Image (tube, helix red, strand yellow):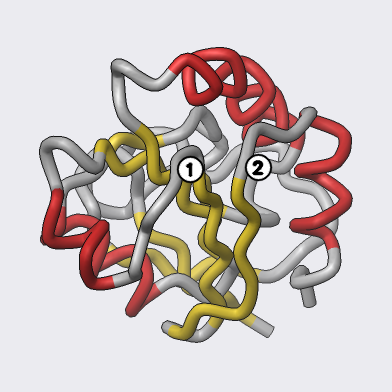
């Protein structure tokens, strides 16, 4: 069985064998490691590519630079992303720069986390959460 993964560097779609663990996986286009699992800051166009084409859950942090809880949660979001390579893709959307995405998803408070699976929103959380709670939440949506 194969799964589609969007490269965090060049945004090309890669089909890779679905496994529990990967030693090495590179993008077929730019050769960057797909195991790079730090959260990726995205604009609207990149957001649409990730959500529409990812065969794994996409976890999106809607945040802003002036938001204290957002800044406090950022290390936990990064820690969860680093512990879950190719299990889920973690994206960051700055609502001040991408206000149309915030409006599209009815973001009224930040941080708001949304999980997308198969191109559709499946769950959301508002407020800062720990890395452990975030990982447990995401694991519910991993096939």
Of marks 2 and 1, the one in the foreground: 2
Instruction: Give me the residue at 56% from left, 37% from top.
Output: 35
Instruction: Tell me: 94 left or right of 7.
Output: left
Q: Position of residue 22 (x, y in %)?
A: 72, 45
Mark 2: give few (<14), some (14-19) or many (20+) Cα within 10 Å.
some
Q: Position of residue 34 (x, y in %)?
A: 48, 42
69, 8: nearer the viewer = 69
Name the residue tied to disc 1.
34
Disc ID at residue 133: none
Q: Position of residue 98 (x, y in %)?
A: 14, 47
Instruction: Give me the residue at 46% from left, 52% from top.
Output: 60
Quick one: SS at disc 1? loop
Q: Using the numbered discs, state the Cα–Cα distance from disc 2 to disc 1 in whole angstroms.
A: 8 Å
> With respect to residue 129, does 50 lie above or below?
below
Could you tell which of marks 2 and 1 lies nearer the N-terminus?
1
Disc ID at residue 85: 2
Instruction: Tell me: 64 left or right of 43.
Output: right
**Which quadrant of the view contains residue 104?**
bottom left
> With respect to residue 132, does 86 lie above or below?
below
């Amino acid at each position: 069985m194969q799964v589609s993964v969007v490269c965090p560097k060049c945004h090309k779609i890669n089909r890779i064998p679905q496994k529990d663990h990967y030693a090495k996986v590179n993008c077929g286009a730019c050769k960057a490691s797909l195991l790079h699992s730090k959260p990726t800051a995205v604009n609207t166009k990149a957001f649409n590519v990730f959500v529409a084409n990812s065969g794994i859950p996409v976890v999106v942090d809607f945040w802003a630079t002036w938001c204290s809880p957002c800044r406090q949660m950022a290390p936990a979001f990064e820690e969860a992303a680093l512990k879950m390579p190719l299990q889920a893709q973690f994206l960051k959307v700055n609502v001040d720069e991408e206000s149309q995405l915030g409006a599209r998803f009815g973001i009224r408070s930040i941080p708001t986390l949304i999980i997308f699976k198969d191109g559709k929103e499946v769950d959301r959380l508002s407020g800062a959460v720990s890395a452990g709670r975030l990982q447990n939440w995401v694991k519910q949506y991993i096939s």
